[in-house]
Amino acid sequence: MGFLSEKPPFTCASPVFCGILGNTLLSTVPGVSGAGPSPEKTLLTPILDAELIATGRITSYPIKPNTPTGCPTPASITRAMMTLCNLPPLFINAGLRHLPTVPCYDVYGSVGEDPRFGDALPPAKDLYRRGEAIGVLLSHYSDLLVLGECVPGGTTTALCVLRALGYSASVSSSFVTNPVSIKEEICSAALLRISTDEITNPLDIIRYTGDPMMPVALGMIRSFTGNLILAGGTQMLAVAALSRAVGLRMPWVVTTCYVRDDPTANVQHLADQIGVQISFVDPGFGDLGHSGLARYCIGEVKEGFGAGGAMCLAHLWGHSPEEIRNQILSTVNAYS
């Protein structure tokens, strides 16, 4: 495969990259998420990643934007693409535990609760309507919306939602070894509640077992009038499945080849089940001479904060794969 498995058939004069920030308490369950130095600190990750993308630095917490093994956070990749394209990123606070440190649209959401023990997201319908309002607003000055997310633990909420919608889904993980058994246990408990209460409405499924990003993204899909790319892997496939379930259009999904190649996730098969077009970016991180980026090739991190979609956007904007790789390498070397 080349740099991009299939180029979306879009042109754009005024693209926007938008990242939806949210928390689910599932990320604090030990072993669920690798998006942070500890389970509790995963609640800070969306804020720190947005800070890095917006300013080029993490200033509110004394850490480098790398995993303990030296693998650069995917937010570094998205930052590199915003710099290359000279595009200011836009952020939405869909439901965070802590106040963000960069400017955000605030939809006054709440942190997603643990779906094993009660409704995960009581304000799901309100967040859907507020997402619609943002989609209308962005339609006035953008012809291409690239929609990413940062929700640690979100692949687990995605698994619950996809299974509740009837899909045979397996989801990816930021860990090299996917904690499949933990995710399956959580999913089984959530699905039991959904089945017992005979829940079938898609927004009610989000209420029972989703996270704050999902209804906001769904509302934006409904109202945004331009072309739209969902930038992410199994989490954005869950949004695409919800879009199908409520009768909305099918956006294009873009993620990395590292998500596609995860043997514990059925990404292409899942996209085929949903009926959504999906493209994979292969940035060739194993050939750049950077030991941390090479760890993507063995399954660490894989994707995050719309990194695949951001690289696709840069390519659509006219930048060559070589320019994209060089910008990423320059950016992550600056953090070493």
Image (cartoon, rainbow, N blue to C red):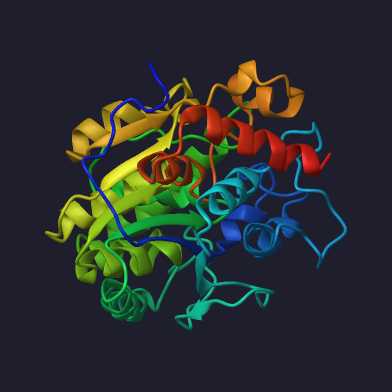
Q: Is residue 42 left or right of residue 178?
A: right
Give percent across and percent down for residue 103: 59, 77
Q: Which residue is found at the position 67% from the left and 22% from the top? A: 294
Give percent across and percent down for residue 282: 47, 25
Q: Which residue is found at the position 23% from the left and 43% from the top? A: 166
Q: In which quadrant will I find the C terminus?
A: top right
Between residues 251 and 320, which one lies in front from this camera angle? 320
Q: In terms of image quadrants, where is residue 314?
A: top left
Q: How many marks?
A: 0
Q: Is residue 39 left or right of residue 280?
A: right
In the image, residue 200 sits, relative to residue 184, either above or below, namely: below
In the image, residue 335 sits, relative to residue 128, either above or below, namely: above
Q: In terms of image quadrants, where is residue 273?
A: top left
Give percent across and percent down for residue 190: 41, 54
Q: Which residue is found at the position 38% from the left and 16% from the top? A: 1
In the image, residue 180 sits, relative to residue 52, either above or below, namely: above
Give percent across and percent down for residue 48: 70, 61
Between residues 194 and 154, which one lies in front from this camera angle? 154
Q: Is residue 69 left or right of residue 179?
A: right
Between residues 208 and 151, which one lies in front from this camera angle? 151
Q: Residue furthest left?
A: 247
Examine the rendering and report whether any part of residue 316 can be seen: yes
Examine the rendering and report whether any part of residue 72 can be seen: no
Q: Is residue 51 left or right of residue 258?
A: right
Q: Residue furthest right?
A: 62
